[in-house]
Amino acid sequence: MIWKFAYRNLLRNKRRSLSTGVAICVGFVGLNLLGAYIYRSKMALDVTSVYSAQRGHVSIYKKDSIQQYQIKPKKYVFSLEEQKQVEQVIAEFSDRVDFTGKKITVPGLLSNGTKSHPVVIYGFDPVAYKKSLTQPSLLEWASDWVLPSQRTDADLFIKNPETLSITPKIAELMSFKYPLISNEAVQIAARTLDGDLNAINADLGAEHTTGMQFLEDTVVLIPIAKAQELLATDAVESISVYLKHDVSVNPFIRDLKEKISGLSFATDLYKFDAVEINALHQGTMGFLYVMGGFFVFLICTAVSLTIINSLTMGIIERTREIGTLRAVGFKTKDVVQLFVRESILLSAMSMAVGILISFLVSSAINAANVRFFPPGASQKIQFVLKWNLYIAGAVFILLFAIATFSSFFVIKSKLRTKLIALLNDTSTFDDDSEEEEEAT
Amino acid sequence: MVVKNLYRADNGAMSSVVEIKNISKSYKLGETHVEAIKNLSLVVTKGEFTALIGASGSGKTTLLNLIGCLDGVDRGDIFIDGMNVKQLNENQKSQLRNEKIGFIFQSFNLIPVLNIYENVELPLTVRKDIQAPERKAKVEAALKDVGLSDFMHHRPDQLSGGQRQRVAIARALVTSPALILADEPTANLDSKTANLIIDLMLELNKTKNVTFFFCTHDEKLMSRVQKIVKIKDGQIEA
Ligand SMILES: Nc1ncnc2c1ncn2[C@@H]1O[C@H](COP(=O)(O)OP(=O)(O)OP(=O)(O)O)[C@@H](O)[C@H]1O
Ligand SMILES: [Mg+2]
């Protein structure tokens, strides 16, 4: 009966209910799509950090290596013996660890006999690289952030350990001709860990992208064995640990830290989005969260004010009706319930429509294949709204709470009026509502 | 309800539905005080049909509002069915109104979005002790008492003034209250319809022993009423 009553009250002034409903609906859709965009950005950053950038979910470094490796490389790498010890510790977590990969980086010079270009040489584990690039989550969230050829060429480095991969930008800078063929010899030169100059040959045969503009003209990839040859060492700079699907990263890091602290040498563990190794992730997400928070605040305020406004106006016309309800025995909480139910009904209906609209809008946007340059990216990526029920649920709960609280606030303050004043109110007479309905 | 202990010890000695003892009520109007009710005492017994008459501004509405717990007295005590209303909080007053008092308003005060049946059902919807089948029976009986069984599914705006007031009477009746208060129930009706409404009230009083206490301007109605209370300047006139 009270629900029915609430429902009919919504129909009483259809125009007002509709405009409030539209405000809730638009707010819902807006927050949903904003949430979808931020969520997709985070997921894309996460998977590219873990898989494309070869950081793994956790990167293990020698203690202080991040600050000191460039200065005293030899001291801040893992020797072969140390690598074995770390791997033994990781092996204890085989239930959670999918695979691992070793990495070493060094600044150097790339040349093809006629031109040279300063680069950062990334020595990576070809097996881990292949596994990384074929991860379904990478495809799902960041298919744009990996060159198509990169994926098909992923086992080139296994087949030919001499292969070197460059970015399209470097190819352009050094006037390499397409298609890149693996018998074109190039030289890479760098200082060994002992400080001596060294240079080796490699086969130019693959192309990749870093996804980041500021890295795009510097990074070349090469199997780690080749990089170690250049650096005259068997040491590695870091070991990346890739976790199985659905394993929580933070608890794993905690557990790994505990175990790894038992080793005779100190280590630093970094999550893939740690600011020390991934300032871009932190910066981008920080910006998106601030922007998102600002919009959430704006939309919530607008929705709340719309509800308060329309309810305040509606309630004026129903003052005497509220008095009548109180007179026939409705307690204040009964009246509050009635109005809150109206708002619950309205927001539930609006958001049901909002779910549909969000779905349609995001599908349309995705189908339209809008491409844009995210800040700092090396190429355009598709504007994708990956929409999920968790976001919709969270937005639903948020707006629902706001709608309920707003209506609660309005009716509560109205009920502070003395009963006799409510009953004597002359702003409307209860029998002339039909005129209002006809007007709508 | 937690008001049991508020019953007066002498309750039941005589079946007074309303007992008013030396009440006063004044309104502030800017600087001046209007004394609407002055040291007034009155008893309404069960089954009485009382008309409160008096000139405009004499305090009729004020008195009815005080009896109906719609407003509070400045001084004095009002007992409804033996209960001192001064000691009730707002929620308890709501409950008291719901269980003991029925209201008939001058301009009907029906809820426009509810049909006739639902309007009559309204006071019962907040009652936890009355289950659906019993509620339905009560609503149907009240509608039958006022002769509107055939109009259950109509909206208030589809009825005439007299019919609307009968709906209001049914709504007041449906809880079987100890007392029905009516402030000029016929003022918005033509005289023929007004008479029919008074007929209905009289009949309900006779057949169901419903206690009515209502105020009116209408001199013609007075002849038909068993007990008349005159009020002048907030005091009962002999
Ligand atoms: N809310 C109020 N504020 C100030 N004064 C009031 C208020 N209500 C009533 N009064 C005053 O109290 C006195 C009694 O008013 P009341 O409404 O009880 O008279 P009444 O007998 O019902 O009159 P009527 O027959 O015109 O309805 C009047 O002098 C009136 O001006
Ligand atoms: Mg009056």
Image (cartoon, rainbow, N blue to C red):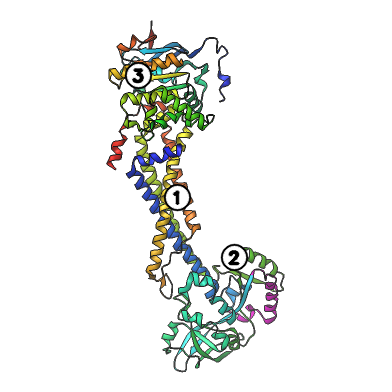
Look at the numbered disc 3 and say if its residue's Cβ is closer than 8 Å to ligand 2: no
Residue A158, x across and y down, in percent: 58, 85
- In the image, is residue B152 above or below residue B51? below
Where the C terminus of chain A falls, by quadrant? top left
- Mark 2 lies on a secondary structure that is loop
The residue singled out by tag 1 in the image is A399
How dense is the environment of label 3, judged by Cα within 10 Å: few (below 14), some, or many (20 and up)? Answer: many
Residue located 55% across and 91% down the image: A199
What secondary structure characterizes most of the magenta part?
helix
- Mark 3 lies on a secondary structure that is helix
Q: What amino acid is labelled 2 in the image?
A: Asp
A415, A430: nearer the viewer: A430
- The label on residue A176 is none
Inspect this view and state whether residue A19 appears: yes
How dense is the environment of label 2, judged by Cα within 10 Å: few (below 14), some, or many (20 and up)? Answer: few
The residue singled out by tag 2 in the image is A246
Where the N terminus of chain A falls, by quadrant? top left
Residue A257, x across and y down, in percent: 66, 67
- Mark 1 lies on a secondary structure that is helix
Q: What amino acid is labelled 1 in the image?
A: Leu
Look at the image and give the residue range highlighted in magenta: A71-96
The residue singled out by tag 3 in the image is B197
Which chain is home to disc 1?
A: A
Looking at the rendered structure, whether the residues under marks 2 and 3 are on a common chain is answered as no
Residue B123, x across and y down, in percent: 45, 28
Residue reaching furthest to the front: B150
- In the image, is residue A429 above or below residue A248? above
CB under 8 Å between discs 2 and 3: no
Q: Quadrant of residue A407?
A: top left
Which chain is home to disc 2?
A: A
Which chain is home to disc 3?
A: B
